[in-house]
Image: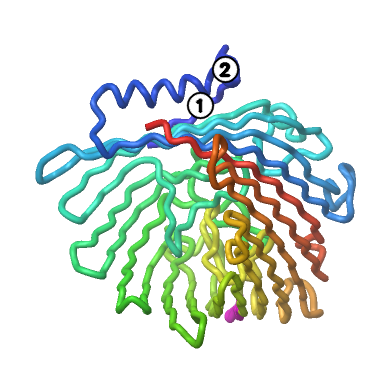
Amino acid sequence: MVVPFSLSHCRVARFGALAVCAGFAANTQAGGFFEDSSAKLEARTVYFNRDFRDGSSSSPQGASKREETAEGFILNVQSGYTEGTVGFGLDALGMLGIKLDSSPADSNSGLMPSTGHDPRRSKDQYAKFGLTAKMRVSETVFKYGALLPDLPLLKYNDGRLLPNMFNGAMLVSQEIKDLTFTASRLDRYTARDSSDSQDLRLNCKNKRYACDITADHFTLYGLDYKVNDRLTAQYQYGELEDIYRQHFVGLLANQPIGPGVLAADVRLLKSDNAGSAKASTIDNRALGALLTYSLGGHKFGAGWQRMNGETSMPYLDGSNPYLVNYLQVNDFANAQERSWQLRYDYDFKAVGVKGLTFMTRYVNGDHINVKGRDEEGKEWERDSELKYIVQGGTFKDLSFRLRNATYRTNYSKFARDVDETRLIVSYNLSIF
């Protein structure tokens, strides 16, 4: 279950609240956790700057910029299981966000929630807490409560200060060698910049669908089969009640070629109406493929993605769409859109600098069917990321990540040009 709360009602110091969370973890351990229990704390500082290249706080386009800095803490406590044929356990997630810098003109970046009386001002702090009961029988695990799912049709979003949390049930079974069966039913979620649990809803990016269309639950079933060490086949079915249903088929493969390794990631998603179709017509078939060739510290990639059907690809709000051309700003999932990608990664370990990596990629999309326009929609995005993880000493595992994105489009009625920079400093501490 997810238990939302707001620290604004508590007379405690900001870092005092963090100490309470750590103390809870230690007391729980002393109360009889098993040998394989663990508690980890991540502290992350995020600076977010999104420049829309136009507009102002009073213009029809909206604010010209979003810029905020915040500190986040994520405590993840996981128990072991009781002994016996059926084992039971309990996990806990505690999250705290603290505003470091924000102004009314540049708020609403997605790092912090807005205050109730003024949507232009961010709260000083917010928090959320979730418990997860779990049961294990042989190679099957059942969980109920707060979940951070990482599946093709259900991938939680962690692109800002604190991740989204979903609430519901999930079963993962590996009773058959090389075959993984997954089943899940969700009924609520807590957004990345919110303390409040809310109904599941359809994501309405760029107003592709009617916004605030909610559903009672989301169900998912899936199979992953490891054919051999070089090939894995995937299938999943997901349905947001009375809104959309979705089939996914995927192939993951790798093959040594010459001195390097060629990897392939192929994804096919078919989406259409479900039940009473509360979001109106949904008709989309998304096909994408990404090929990469790794050689020493280099990795060269090329991708292709195509949308067919009358509409864009639907996905659950709070989740990341499982598309090869889903990037930092855009998803390239508009109706009829076709897009291609070029990507390059480099691991500086190849030249003796461990922990330092670099990535850059470019995606170009066209042939977009924009409602109310005869002109073909076009867009492109360029991303770069430089990351360093401290390898030893007092600050071992401290990471610095600088991300930059440039996005441009010719259909500004629904989307805006963006220049974006994110700086993320993260430190992971193992409590026990």
Q: Position of residue 223 (x, y in %)?
A: 31, 69
Q: On the rendered structure, is 139 left or right of 316?
A: left
Q: Nearer the viewer, residue 65 or 79?
A: 79
Residue 28 in sight here: yes
Q: Quadrant of the N terminus?
A: top left
Who's the residue at 58% across and 42% down the image? Answer: 398
Magenta segment? 303-310
Tags 2 and 1 touching, CB below 8 Å: yes
Image x and y of residue 326, in percent: 61, 66
Image quarter for residue 209? Answer: bottom right
Label 1 packing within 10 angstroms: few (<14), some (14-19), many (20+) = some
Q: Would you name the residue on which mark 2 appears?
A: 9
Provide the major secondary structure of the magenta segment: strand
- Residue 412 sits in which quadrant? bottom right
Residue of label 1: 5
Q: Tag 2's secondary structure?
A: helix
**Secondary structure category for the residue under label 1:** strand
